[in-house]
Each structure stands twice: as C-alpha cells, then as structure tokens.
Amino acid sequence: MTKDYWNDRYINNQTGWDLGAVSPPIMEFTDGIEDRDLKILIPGAGNAYEAEYLFKSGFKNVFLCDIAEIPLNSFSRRNPEFPGQQMLHQDFFEIENSFDLILEQTFFCALPVSKRNAYAHKTSELLSPGGILAGLLFDFELKEDGPPYGGSREEYLTYFRPYYHIEILEKAYNSIKPRLGNELFFKFRKK
C-alpha cells in the first residue's frame, strides 16, 4: 500500500472505485450542511470529486489527502483555483491538524484490516471536539484479495464505538446502481 502501488493503479487505469463524479449519498449529506466555514478533510481522496464539489459549493476550508501524486495532479489541473496548501500529498496517518468534518469515500475499505483500528483512532485524533466522521463504507463480505476489502456493520462498530457516538449507520438508499445494497452511509460524532 505504498505511494508507488497507488500511482501504478492510476497509471494502469485500475481505479474501479472512481465514480468520475461525487457520490450521491455524500452529495446529499454535504448539501445539508449550512456552515460553509467547516474545516473538512477527505482522506485517500483520489481524484477528489467530493472536494471539487464542496469547493465549488462554497466550502473553502476543504483539505484532501492522498499518498499518490497522480490523482492530486489531476485534481489540480481540473481545479487550478484550489489552494495548493490544502492538497496534502502524504500518508493519512502522518497528518497533524484538526478538522470539523472528515468525509470517508472508499479510503477505509482500501486499508488492510490490520490498519482499521488505527484509522478509527487517527480520525478521532484529527477531529475537533464534537467533530463528525461521515461517509460510506462498503457492506459486503470481508475478503483477503482487496482492495477493497469489504466488511460489515458489526465489524465496523467494533472499531468506531470506542471513539464515536454512532448517529447513523444504515444501508445507503441512494447509492449508484452498481453499488446499491453494498454501501452503508454513516455519521459518527466524536465522543
């Protein structure tokens, strides 16, 4: 799961997770946010269509992070007005900052299972008091030949309950057709 691994996935067009647009459940969730000054992080952002959508919707404190530079360069070409200092080309686990909202879109399920506890802990460290972790998690049988690795509601609760109040964790009703029935929308509030 090195930067070379992920850059190679982009070079070889092995990006089945990439929708080419913002995910409908995330769009609906963010459309309901009134405070456009929130400081938002999108980890493992890839081509970052969510960041692009948020920025063009008036959210100016959006940060995206990816270990691979190819998708960040693509994002920058599409969005030359986006502040360069808000594009973090680094390992998510090395970020030292504070955010009001972290948006999850395919990053968690791309992590090996051995990193999932660390992800839950790191997101809680990065969030300000009462901050929100929200987005989508895949809901299909855990497999060893990922990414994506999948997982279940019950498994996810074991990682996040120690750090978060579980406000929403349910089947996404508005997933894109190929993912319908295989995504959970969630909203967790930091304890």
Image (cartoon, helix red, strand yellow):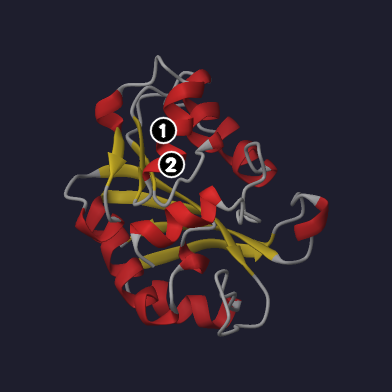
Q: Is residue 181 above or below residue 45?
A: below
**x, y percent for residue 98:** 22, 44
Please state which amino acid type lies under the numbered disc 2: Ile
Q: Is residue 132 left or right of residue 138?
A: left
Q: Residues within 10 Å of mark 1 (few under 14, many from 20)?
A: some
* Local SS, label 1: helix
Comparing 183 with 81, the one in front is: 81
Which residue, given by chain and number where applicable, does mark 2 sit on?
A: 70
Quadrant of the frame with the N terminus: bottom left
Residue drawn at the location 66% of the way across and 39% of the way down = 20
Q: Is residue 35 above or below residue 119?
A: above
Which residue, given by chain and number where applicable, does mark 1 sit on?
A: 73
Quadrant position of residue 122: bottom left
Q: Is residue 14 above or below residue 165?
A: above
Comparing 73 with 147, the one in front is: 73
Q: Which mark is residue 176?
A: none
**Distance CA(mark 2)–CA(mark 1):** 5 Å
| Circle 2/circle 1 CB separation < 8 Å | yes
Quadrant of the frame with the C terminus: bottom left
Q: Is residue 161 visible?
A: no
**x, y percent for residue 82:** 38, 21
Q: Is residue 37 visible?
A: yes
Q: Is residue 36 above or below residue 104?
A: above
Residue drawn at the location 47% of the way across and 31% of the way down = 75
**x, y percent for residue 121:** 28, 68
Quadrant position of residue 21: top right
Comparing 165 with 8, the one in front is: 8
Residue drawn at the location 58% of the way across and 53% of the way down = 12
* Local SS, label 2: helix
**x, y percent for residue 52:** 51, 28
Q: Residues within 10 Å of mark 2 (few under 14, many from 20)?
A: many
